[in-house]
Amino acid sequence: MQLDGSHTPCKRGGAAVGYQGRKASKTSNTLYLCDNQGQMLCCASPQEGQHNDLFELQTLFDEICNFLTKAGIDVKGLFLNADAGFDSKEFRKACEQKEVIANIPHNPRNKKEIESRAYQYFDEELYKQRYVIERANAWQDQFKALIIRYETRVDTWVNLLILSFMVIFIRRIIKKNKS
């Protein structure tokens, strides 16, 4: 599994919107989870854009795991690749509680946790597969309605995201059947 967050500019405001200085606009931050083939599996509830990826991460990770469990996907024993922005004691502990093996590179900004790093798992070869979430996000960017968020309601926005997941999946099935 691959985990990543993405900020989407929001033009009309609404729920879960906040100013993000790096983007110089109001944004929503959404966490996405995809499989190793780049198929999006689910997304967490969008958060206000001024927050980083670690904001309410335990709650959002629980939400993602519950969604997968309801879909019949057991998370126990799965490897989870995430970038260094997700390197925190709390997130690693949440993964451990769900029996998910977190493969997260060490964030050089976490200087307080240097001693505990020797005991944290990280596999560079496995981490190289993380490009699939970036590619999946790029596939999602082909939907012009998703590049900039005009919806003011969070449920409408999430439904559009899930619809894009389904369209990408259907296109993949059609492509495989043609070959």
Image: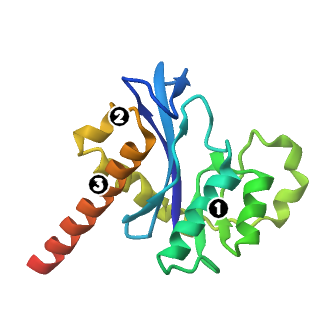
The reply, left or right, for residue 62 in relation to residue 162 is: right
Residue type at the position of mark 3: Ser
In the image shown, does 70 or 3 lie closer to the viewer? 70
Determine if residue 176 is in view. yes
The reply, left or right, for residue 96 in relation to residue 132 is: right
The residue where tag 2 is placed is: 151
In the image shown, does 93 or 113 lie closer to the viewer? 93
The number of callouts visible is: 3
> What residue is shown at x 47% (from left), y 23% (from top)?
26
> What residue is shown at x 23% (from left), y 45% (from top)?
142
The percent position of residue 67, horizontal first and vertical second, equals 52, 67
The reply, left or right, for residue 119 in relation to residue 66 is: right
Name the quadrant containing residue 174: bottom left
The quarter of the picture where the C terminus appears is bottom left
The residue where tag 1 is placed is: 62
Residue type at the position of mark 1: Asp
The percent position of residue 48, horizontal first and vertical second, equals 56, 33
Q: Earlier in the sequence, mark 1 or mark 3?
A: 1
Distance from the alpha carbon under mark 1 to that under mark 3:
23 Å
Residue 164: mark: 3
Determine if residue 179 is in view. no
SS category of the residue bearing label 1? helix
Query: How many residues crowd mark 1 within 10 Å: few (<14), some (14–19), many (20+)?
Result: some
Residue 6: mark: none
Position of 71 relative to 57 (above/below): below
Q: Earlier in the sequence, mark 1 or mark 2?
A: 1
The percent position of residue 22, horizontal first and vertical second, equals 53, 24
> What residue is shown at x 52% (from left), y 51% (from top)?
4
Residue type at the position of mark 2: Glu
